[in-house]
Amino acid sequence: MNVLLVEDEPRVADFIDRGLRAENHGVTVAPSGAEGVELAKSGEFDVIVLDLMLPDMHGFDVCQKLRLEGDHTPILMLTAMDAIEDRIKGLKIGADDYLTKPFDFDELLARIEALVRRAHQFAPKTKVLQVADLTLDRELLEVRRGGEAIKLTAKELAILELLMGAPGRVFSRTRILNQVWGYSEDPLTNVVDVYIARLRRKIDPPGSEPLLETVRGHGYRLKAAN
């Protein structure tokens, strides 16, 4: 699970960051609303934990801006305000859950995991993914390029499904690690690079148009169809 934490108070941010990483979740901290909005555009996050009292803009405004821009990532609001009117307002403008400070970390974790489960449960899944002449049948677990079958390991298949689910989107090493291995940091130094190299050799044979691209300093993506 990859979490975007929008929180300007260092003590609270560090408390949540350390707790989530201890549970092997990836965390990116944004200390301002503007930075949170910009980071959210990457589409790399499974859930956003959003403080309301930010230095540059109110959390309600951050939430509303994300929803107006078509970002449907689950949002959990954190605030010291416990008035029922504030909770109702937050939920009406697009928040998915609300937690008042001070809070117990176990409750925060449980709420975050519930939001992610709910989002995945209702996300429609296409049976067959296709990018150019590369296809992945999710039910049969079959991969083909130009009609030719390709044998992949379970990890290679999981990476390919992640990339094919969003052609053109850059996936960082951290995101791939978290989604495929469940790690927030790479314990084997270059395991993602090794598997990407193996996958590239299989899906981009000599003479074919390369589909798997490296975006230096950022990660990997499958070329989107023109």
Image (spheres, rainbow, N blue to C red):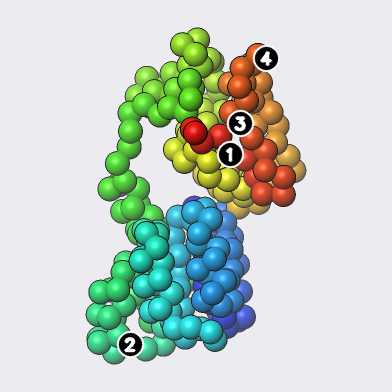
User: Does residue 184 show up?
Assistant: yes
Gap in angstroms between the C-alphas marked 4 and 3? 13 Å
What is the quadrant of residue 129 in the picture?
Answer: top left
For the image, the number of numbered tags is 4
Q: Is residue 183 visible?
A: no
Q: CA distance from mark 3 to mark 1?
A: 6 Å
Kindly identify the residue that appears in the image at 56 percent across and 34 percent down: 223
Task: Give the mark nearest the N terminus, 1 or 2.
Answer: 2
Q: Amino acid at mark 3?
A: Leu
Mark 2–mark 4 CB contact (< 8 Å): no
Q: Which residue is mark 4?
A: 206
**Mark 2 or 3, nearer chain start:** 2
Between discs 4 and 3, the one toward the N terminus: 4
Q: Position of residue 88 (x, y in %)?
A: 25, 80
Q: CA distance from mark 2 to mark 4?
A: 61 Å
Q: Which numbered mark, 2 or 4, is in the foreground of this view?
A: 4
**Numbered label attached to residue 221:** 1
Identify residue type, mark 4: Pro
Q: Amino acid at mark 1?
A: Arg
Q: Give the label, 2 or 3, closer to the camera.
A: 3
Question: Which quadrant of the view contains residue 50?
Answer: bottom left
- Badge 4 crowding class, 10 Å Cα cut-off, few under 14, some 14 to 19, many 20 or more, is few
Disc 2 residue type (three-letter):
Asp
Of the numbered discs 3 and 1, the one sitting upstream in the chain is: 3
Disc 2 and disc 3: Cα gap in Å?
A: 48 Å
User: Mark 2 or mark 4, which has the lower sequence index?
Assistant: 2
Residue position for label 3:
212
Query: Badge 1: few (under 14), some or many (20 or more) residues near its Cα, within 10 Å?
Result: many
From the viewer's perspective, is residue 155 above or below residue 8?
above
